[in-house]
Image: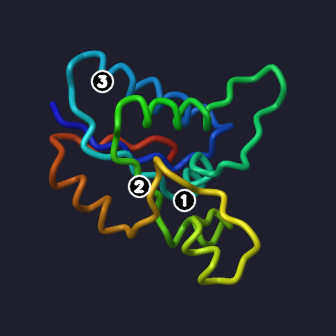
Amino acid sequence: MKFAIALFAPPHAPASRRALRFAQAALAGGHELVRLFFYQDGVHNASGNTVSEQGTLDVAAEWRAFIEANRLDAVVCIAAALKRGVLDADEAARYQRPAANVQAPWTLSGLGQLHEANQLADRLICFGGQA
């Protein structure tokens, strides 16, 4: 089965860890992840400046390692990212900000990437969305 995952929660929220564990289990079960899409506060998972509390799981670092190890397509919604100060080098330069905090394996792109992922996948699974 082909899955697309949309994550709406920041790294410190339980939904982020649940999404990561689901993604790991899906791959271990022989399924395909067509895209991971980080949206709303989920964009903070892509920030290289996120620091977890001492003694707690660094979910953002685990996402990075998982994505890199499996060469996954990890897209961060550019509109949500800009609003939250989550910038890659191009956007930091464009908006004349002093630093970038997003780099590979994540890419900033539009919401159309989520729509496309939904079309490519058998199932879109969302974590952390508001009811």
Q: Report, in whole angstroms, how far the alpha carbon at label 1 lies from the one at label 2.
A: 12 Å
Dot in front, 3 or 2: 2
Taking the spot 46% from the left edge, 47% from the top edge, the residue there is 105
Residue furthest to the top: 29
Taking the spot 39% from the left edge, 23% from the top edge, the residue there is 24
**Residue tagged 1:** 40
Q: Amino acid at mark 1?
A: Gln
Q: Where in the figure is residue 76, as x and y percent of width and height?
A: 47, 58
Q: Quadrant of residue 80?
A: bottom right
Q: Amino acid at mark 3?
A: Ala
Q: Is residue 98 above or below residue 10?
A: below
Q: Mark 1 packing: few (<14 Cα in 10 Å), some, or many (20+)?
A: many
Q: Is residue 63 left or right of residue 87?
A: left
First-in-chain label (1 vs 2)? 1
Q: Is residue 116 above or below residue 49?
A: below
Q: Are marks 3 and 2 in contact (CB under 8 Å)?
A: no
Q: Where in the figure is residue 45, as x and y percent of width and height?
A: 59, 46
Q: Where in the figure is residue 35, as x and y percent of width and height?
A: 31, 46
Q: Where in the figure is residue 2, as x and y percent of width and height?
A: 18, 36
Q: Mark 2 packing: few (<14 Cα in 10 Å), some, or many (20+)?
A: many
**Residue tagged 2:** 75
**Residue tagged 3:** 26
Dot in front, 1 or 3: 3
Q: Is residue 131 above or below residue 83?
A: above
**Circle 2 SS class:** strand
**Circle 3 SS class:** helix
